[in-house]
Amino acid sequence: AGLSESELRQLEEYGLLASDKEVYDGEDLVAARAAREFFAFGVEARHLRMYRQFADREATFFEQIVTPLSRRRTPDAEEQASQSVHELLALSRRMREAMLRSSLRDLL
């Protein structure tokens, strides 16, 4: 991802990357690369912690919506739950981007 050891440790310290992993996965790589680009703007890892907090809250919200679907006793319950999560991710992305653009209207 092009991060220094110090930057990597900071991302772990602030919960943006899990420090208990021996090998990072693809999502970790995406987050690390995005963090590197934020660092180029002078942003520090501690400022990025809000993204972990937002993601955790959103994941809990999605779990509340989807868990009843996954507990159904139908053969396709898991597939329906997975599809719902994908749909929720897309809706969330659209909502978040619209809200952010609205908040930044004067800068755009």
Image (spheres, helix red, strand yellow):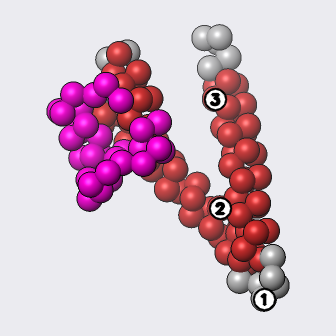
**Circle 3 Cα neighbour tier, 10 Å, few/some/many (<14 / 14–19 / ≥20):** few
Q: Report which quarter residue 32 is drawn in.
A: top left
Residue 22: x %, y % from top left: 26, 54
SS at badge 1? loop
Q: Which residue is mark 1?
A: 73
Q: Which mark is residue 17?
A: none
Does dot 2 land on a helix, a strand or a loop? helix
Q: Amino acid at mark 3?
A: Leu
Q: Which part of the image, by quadrant, shows the C terminus? A: top right
Give the residue number, with chain letter if any, for mark 3.
100
Mark 1: few/some/many CA within 10 Å (<14, 14-19, 20+): few
Camera-side mark, 1 or 3 = 1
Read off the magenta span.
1-30
Q: Quadrant of the N terminus?
A: top left
Is residue 34 positioned above or below 11 on the image? above
Image-based side of 10 in relation to 26, left or right:
left
Residue placed at 49% from the left, 56% from the top?
56
Residue 62's disc number? 2
Q: Residue at x 76, y 61 (%)?
A: 84
Residue drawn where x is 77% and y is 52% of the image: 87
Question: Seen from this angle, which residue lies furthest bottom?
Answer: 73
State which tag comes first along the sequence, 2 or 1. Answer: 2
